[in-house]
Every structure is written in structure tokens, then in C-alpha cells.
Image: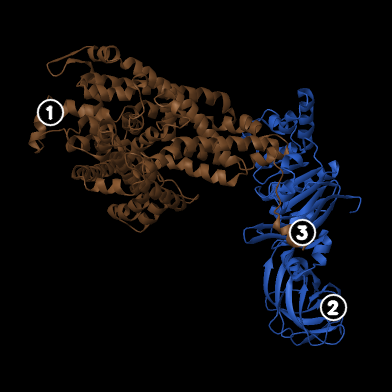
Amino acid sequence: MAAALLKAVPLRQQVHWSERIAHVALILVALTLLAFLAGPLGAILQQSLQDAQGRFAGLANFIAYAKTPALLDSLWNSVWVSALVTLITIPTAFGFAYALTRSRMRFKALARTITLVPLLAPSLLAAISLIYWFGNQGLLKAWLARVGIDQIYGAPGIVLAETFSTFPHALMILITALTAADARLYEAADSMGTSAARKFFTITLPGAKYGLISAALVTFTLVVTDFGIPKVIGGSFNVLATDVFKLVIGQQDFQKGAVVALLLLAPAVLTFAVDHWVSKKQTAMLSARAVPYQPKKVPWYDAIMEGYCVLVCALILAMLGMAVFASFASFWPYNLSPSLRHYTMGLFDAEVGEAFVNSLGMAAGTAVFGGALVFIGAYMLEKTQGLKPVRGLVRLLAMLPMAVPGLVLGLGYIFFFNAPGNPLSGLYHTLTLLTICTIVHFYTTGHLTAVTALKALDAEFESVSASLKVPWYTTLWRVTLPICTPALVDIARYFFINAMTTISAVVFLYSPETKVASIAILNLDEAGEIGAAAAMAILIAAANTVATFAFMALSWWIDRRTQAWKQR
Amino acid sequence: MSEATYLRLAGIRKEFGAFTALSHIDLDIAKGEFVCFLGPSGCGKTTLLRIVAGLELQSAGRIELAGRDISRLPPAKRDYGIVFQSYALFPNLTVADNVAYGLTNRKVPRRQALARVAELLALVGLPGSEAKYPAQLSGGQQQRIALARALATAPGLLLLDEPLSALDAIVRVKLRQEIRSLQRQLGVTTIMVTHDQEEAFAVADRIVVMNQGAIEQVGDAMQVYRDPASLFVADFVGRINVLGATALDAGRLRIGAHEFHCEHAFRSGSELRVYLRPEDVLARPIVAGDPNVFDAQIEKIEFMGPYCLVRVGSHALADHKLTVYLSLNYLAEAQLEVGSRMPLRMVPERMRIFE
């Protein structure tokens, strides 16, 4: 009887008051993610199942969508264009990654840096450049006709521009995949007299298999969900992302917009699931005893690899260079003498200056508050105990943004925060909401960086602190935070750069007072001021370059102050 | 509860889902005692230590420390210092800041804290290393600093979780002696978790041998070695020969075709298992007519330094093989080699017999 009673009441450890603070922090992170991620996504789902009057409509919206031929065309367009871009980008990027990791070519660091430059500018910069190269008044318009393409506007332009803008993303994944090679496998193959081709197909390719799958999915998803490029160079060629915009902003058809948004969510969710599966496989593949692969010097082969990289880098620089050149040209294509006309026009006449200030403010806010939120969330998950259900929820919500395209998130924000009766509706159209939306949009990458940094620390630091009666926040301040500062600076930089260039999430959320620079560029282009649009895109890239150097300097300075212990 | 009991564990149980990690642990530890939890990996010894520390919560049971019920207290409200296998030194803090970590929080004045740090560093044999960072020290030195940090606040209980496992053999032997003498000097009640019996023998006042979540035996090194309470303890601690036997009348048993004398009486005809350490099979002195002497043939000699592990077979013992220790000198003197025959004697009072 007594024994049965004892069993029925499980023991509970008393909670120290300092632990309660941690629990409150964890709950606050959970509530933030619920309000600014789960809520908006739920609103989209709700909207897709309602009619215009807000009554439950079942699958009526989906059926109506399937009966609209024009919309189905867009779905097909999105799919084949994304597939084609993936087919071009992956081999191109694989070749580049292979050259960087498996040859002794020169200028590796330079080549790597050049490929990162497109990340500093809004993706639509590529579309603007293409218009200058191949557009109606393009420099090389005649070349298009020779390969049988009558105009760059439409699918050809989208494919080329997307290839350019997805290349760095695919490259990063493939470099990681090819770096994780075990030299012993190649030595074993050599000792058996295996040919180079056979080694490539039996060791290299299988080893990079998961990286290839992951890179292909990421590329596909990026293209399907990108809004800026099809908007600028798509012409009358419709895709899902432009449809959402037209349905919601143009026709105010929120229900069909929600249906298309859910369609956009599908490939991203698939990517997310496969990526999760892949990352599990990949860690198991490389044992701790693997010997890193060191390429040997083979002059003719290294020269070929170098030649290939030079060619790709030249194409990237041609894209960037044209945008820079055109932004300074007085009057394309008739008067190419340099002037600041587009810059003054954009900044002052079109009032992009204000938008630019808004952008900088939003990026700084995203970096500071996003960095703090991500780090606190990750710390509470990794280094504190208790509140199991909330912990599981936060873990899930932290990973979810990776599967949510910006356009979908932004649409969810309209539905959720514009709804009458939402106590947070006062945030609608404010720069604060734009900042929060951007933080949530890019949350997962920051979260994973923070978790990786925290996992690298000895798991017993917190136990030792507790035994010494030192509360967790003292150890966080004195030990964990100083050790993790380099990762934290990385997270802040990632947030900053993405906040400067993002279009998709914020395109639904701005008001005339809170317009940001990337949106202003879109509006300039729409108004036919493509030169000014180019100029403003270049300014964003320049600002991001300056910011990158500033973050590097900050990192260096912090390193000198706090990482003295690394010296042996 | 006797007066000297400092830590008392009563009915401790721990389940992880359907898996029972600890089942009904009762243990009293006296003030100033050095106790080792010894057992194979997965026996629950580390879980038990973490329960004492409050880093895991027992599913049931009571823990008293210095007469105070601490069963449900969070770690910060218990009174102990802990040292982990990984050292867990804060890499970005100097040695002095690491050692003073618990003092700073207690608002100990800086001058006093520094004096305490210097005192502790002298105690662990690393005086003057205040300004160094952990990465500048060897593994053994880092573990000394971790020890100093754990002792800085003068806790009543010191918990050591496999503190020597990450170190190489020579450092390990040296440091375990230092830990032992330090513990004697300070008189701090200490629990050390280890899977290394030699280590437990060298430092512990009492050894708690654990297996599959239960305590098999509690005793000092000699008791555990000479008088194992169970087959598991006999097997796990030291090398041992296991021989199947049949009980005859009082004080006699049969192994193979040979009848031996033993000190205990068993029911005639019952099946027995005889446990005998290699050093309890003697090559000399041999007295003619001793019923426990049997004829053996050397099958294999394994050189171990001053003595050899010698594997012998015997017609008398049928299929049973025995491992015995013979000194190198004796082997040379008696000109013994593989294939040689010799008489051996089983010491009756050293036979551990299980029914």
C-alpha cells in the first residue's frame, strides 16, 4: 500500500530560484516564436480554408485554383524553370568546388571570395545586369538571336539570373561535402592501381552524394520561392512567386494567395525533411580517425581547373561589373560617359535615401536583436534543464523557418497582424515588424550556428558551476558568452547582410514610411528607372561590403581581447 | 544511523524509461572516508554519483548529507565539490580565476581569495601557476587544477567521476597517490567512481563493487579480493580460476578424478564452483601425502616480469586448466619449461566455493 503510494508520486527536484529565471527566458523565447512564426503560418492555413467572407469553405479554394488554367501554367513554369536552373547550377558549382578542394590551382582564396560577392547584393541585381547585357538595348542582344532566343525577358532571363544568384549557395554546400574526404580511401585505391575516373565514380561522387542532394534541393527551393528576379526580368512569364504577389496585392484575393503560398511551402518542407535526413547520414560517414585529403601537384590538371575557375569568376565579375558600369553611365546606351545621375536620381528624387536609412536601421536591429534572441534561445535549449514540453516546442519552432519561404512568411504576417482583434496589430506596417519578420525568416541558420558553438563547450561547465553554487547566468557571462563571441559576431553579420538584401518577406509588410531599399529598387525598376535601380542595388552591395569588413574588424578586436587563452 | 555516518543513501532507485539503472541502493559513508564505486561500464556507478550530486534525480529513495535530507535539493543547495574526467576547466579563465570561481561568488574579499588560491595551488603541487591558462597545462596538471577548484570552498564532500581515466598510465599512478594523501590531509569525505580495480585498491578505505545497478559487495580492498561476496565480484576483481566440482562427504570435494580437502561442508553430491586465485595454487612447499597436491603439466608460460603466468593442465583434473603465478627465479631453479611436469598444491583455506 505504502509502496504503491510512493510509486504513484514521482520525486521532483526543488527548483533553484536561478533556474526559474532560465525557465522564464525559455518561455519568452517560445512565446516570441509562437506569436511571430506559428501564428502567421496558422493564419495562412486558416485563410486557405475560408471563403472571402471568412466562412469555412473546406477545399473549395484549392479546387478553384486547380480550375484556373493561368495559375496552373505558373505552377508548371515554376517547376520546369527551377529544375532547369538546378541542372545548370549543380554541375557548374560542383566543378568549381572540386577545383577548390581537389586541385593545387592558384588563387583559391581569391576565387572563393569572388563567388561570395553575389551574396552581398539583392538577387535581382543579376536580373538588372542581364537586361543591360541582353535586353532590348543590351550590349550583346545580337548574340541571343544567334542561339535562337528572341528575347531575354521571360524564362531565359530568369534561368540565367537564378543560376547566377543560386551559385554561391550551392557552392558552399558542395565545398563542405568535398572537404570531408578521407585520404586513406584514395591511398587504398592507389595501392590497387585504380584509374582516376574509377576513383572519381567510386569514391568522390558517392562521398559527396549527400552534399549533392542537399545542394540540388536548396537550389530548387531558392528558385521556386524567389520573387525579385522573375519580377524584374520575367516579363509576361508567370511563376508561383509572382502569382502570390499579384493575387494578394493586385486582386486582393487572399484565399487563392494562401493556396499558392501553401504550394510554395511544399518544396521547402521537402528540402527541410531531406536535409535533416542527409545531415544525420553525413555525420555518421566521416569518422574521427579520417585523414584529411591533400591534393597532389599535377601541373596540366591544376591548369585546367584554374582555367575553369577563371572562366566562372569572369562571368560573375561580368555580371557585377555591368551593373556597376551601367549605374554610372549617363544615358544608356547613347551616352556612356560616367556620371552620378542615377545615384542622385535614386537617392534624392525617388527618395530611396530614406529607404536606405530604413534598411540600415532594420539590418542593425535584425543583427542585434536577432543575434540576442537566437543566442538566448539556443543557450536555454542546450545548457539549462527542466520544462521539457516547452523545450521540445522551441526546438521545433527554431528549425521551422528553414522550411518557410520569405514570401509565405510575409503573407502570413499580413493575415495575422492585419486581422482585427489581434492585440499586436499596432505593429502592422512598422519597421519593428519588418525587423521581427526578417529575424524569424533567417532564424534557423543563426540558431544552428549558435547550437554548434554551444555544443563544442564541455557539457559539465554548468554542473561544476552548480556545485560551486555559482548561478548559471554568472557562468554564461564569464565563460560561455566570451567563448562564443566569434560565433555570435558571425550570426549578427549573417542577419545584417540578409536583412539588407531580402525582398520576399518584407514586400507585403512595408508602408510608404517604412519602405526599405531592396523594395525601393523593385519600385524603381517597375517605374522604368532601371539605371537608378542598378545604382541602388550597387549601394546595398557596397554597404554590405563595408559591413562585412566592420564585422571582421569587430571579430578581430574581440578575438584579441577575449581569446587570449587560445595561445599556447 | 551511526554517529559517524556522513552520507547516507537509503533505497535509491533510478529508472530511465523501462531501463532500471539502479535498484535499491543502501549505503552509509562515514565522515572522512574514501569510498570507491567500482564496476564495469554501465553498472550504474556514475549514475549513483550524479544522484548524490543532484545532477540526476533518483526515481525513489532518500539521501542524507550530514544529517540533512538533501533528496530533493538542487545541486547548488548541496555541499560538495566535483571533478570530472574531462576536467571541465573554464578555458578562457586563468588558473587563478578557475580556482577562485566559487569563492568570487561568495563575496570572499579579493585578497583573501588570492591567498586561498595560492594555498590550494601549493596543496596540489602547482604553486605559482596562477596566471596560466588551462590550455598551457598538461592533462595531469589540468586535473590538479580541477581538484583545487573543487576544494576551494572547503566542501564537506568531494566527488570524483573517473578523474584519472583521461590520463596516461604513469601520471595516473602518481596522481592517484597524491589524491589519496591530499584526502588524508584534509579529511574530506570522498567518493571516487572508477572501473579500474587497481586504482580502487590503491586509494579506497572501502570499495563498493557494483554490477547491473546493484551493490554486489562493500568492503576494504583485502575483503573484496580475498573474500568476494559473489561470483561477479570474484570474477571482476583480480584474475581467478573457476573449477567445476562435486561435493563429497563433509570437508571433501571432487574435481575431475581428484579428491580435495576443503574447509566447508556441502550436501553430498551437489554441484559446486570452486574459485581459486592464481597465487593460491602453490608449487612449494609440497608435503608428500597431502590430499590437495596434484600432478600438473605446463602448457604455456607467459612472461610478466618478476613472475610468470603459467597455464597448466592435469590428467587428475580432467579437462580443467589452471592459471598459476610462478616466480621467474623458481622456474629457472627448477628448470621448468613448457611440457615439464610438476606437483602443485591448492590451499584449502583460500578456496572460495559457491553452490
Asked which secondary structure carries label 2, the reply is loop
Q: Amino acid at mark 3?
A: Ile
Q: Position of residue B130 (x, y in %)?
A: 71, 29
Discs 1 and 2 lie in a common subunit: no
Residue count near mark 3 (Cα–Cα under 10 Å), binned few <14, some 14–19, many ≥20: some
Q: Nearer the viewer, mark 1 or mark 2?
A: 1
Reply above or below: A514 against A305: above
User: Between disc 2 and disc 3, whose residue precedes?
Assistant: 3
* Callouts 2 and 3 in the same chain: yes
- Which residue has dot 1 on it? A140
The picture places residue A79, in percent across and down from the top left corner, at: 24, 45
Kind of residue at badge 2: Ile
Residue topped by disc 3: B25
Residue at the spot 53% in from the left edge and 36% down from the top edge: A29
* Residue bearing the label numbered 2: B286
Chain to which mark 2 belongs: B
Q: CA distance from mark 1 to mark 3?
A: 84 Å
Q: Which chain is blue?
A: B
Q: CA distance from mark 2 to mark 3?
A: 46 Å
Observer-nearest residue: A347 or A280? A347
Label 1: element kind: loop
Describe residue A511's horizontal placement relative to residue B167 as left or right. Answer: left
